[in-house]
Amino acid sequence: MIDNRLRLSRTALPSAACLALAAAAALLPTGAHAAPTAPTAAAGTTLSPAGHRFSAVADGPVVFEAGPIVVTCAASSTLPGAEGRNTVPDGPGPAGPASVRISPPGFQDCTTDVPGLRVSVETNEQAGPWQVLLQHGSPSTARLSIPTGGFVLRTSGLLACTALAAPTAPATADGTWDEQQGSVLLLDRAPIPVKITGSFFCATSVTTATITARYAVHDTTDPTRRITVGP
């Protein structure tokens, strides 16, 4: 398990607080980590069992980073919703990834080590859908697609700042799909663009943040089955 805790300098508190905002705004692109290896399969991707509903629940904390700052959300999930959200599509997919619309994920109990700074996260579908794009390959990949302005992080208390993820266009967080220990979507410091607004001490120059998370995907139609990605 990656140790995502951070020791903050009390002498740089205002800027640290803003960076925390940017960090939490993350859900994903740049970063020191390379993108997942391109899948080797050229054929379409098939998800199964077709028509089944699923949930994706964070197995451990979700960690957002910007520079030296870390914000941690203790819980996160996306659950089956209206209009077929979180439903495995029928039949083989096209020659690219299979796209699945999901309910906007929730993020709860988000904290930072900055004293006196409270953090809240809201997600929405006002400008388009949240999606997961799955591609069979070696390894199989999983990309989290965030609609424009679909993730908003706010701080209050010490500083009042707002961080907007995917501020001008939909953004994608690149990760991997692992079926070795269950059906799991992994994000490892995946970057995403952010826009910071607020008071003078808000870090408006910060334009990217990263997310690290491990989402366990469960078949809610038949809990004895697993969601799988194949050719």
Image (cartoon, rainbow, N blue to C red):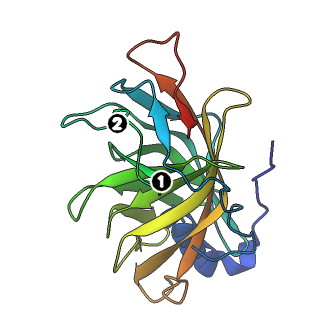
Q: Is residue 84 above or below residue 111?
A: above
Which residue carries the number 2 mark? 89
Residue at position x 42%, y 63% from top?
A: 153
Distance from Cα at disc 1 to Cα at disc 2: 12 Å
Q: Which mark is residue 139?
A: none
Q: Identify which amino acid the numbered label 2 is placed on.
A: Pro
Q: Is residue 25 above or below residue 215?
A: below
Find the residue positioned furthest to the front.
43
Upstream in sequence: badge 1 or badge 2: 2
Q: Is residue 203 above or below residue 2?
A: below
Residue 86 percent coordinates (x, y) = 35, 35
Residue 28 percent coordinates (x, y) = 54, 66
Residue at position x 43%, y 80% from top?
A: 195
Q: Nearer the viewer, residue 110 or 218?
A: 218
Q: Is residue 105 above or below residue 120?
A: above
Which residue carries the number 1 mark? 97
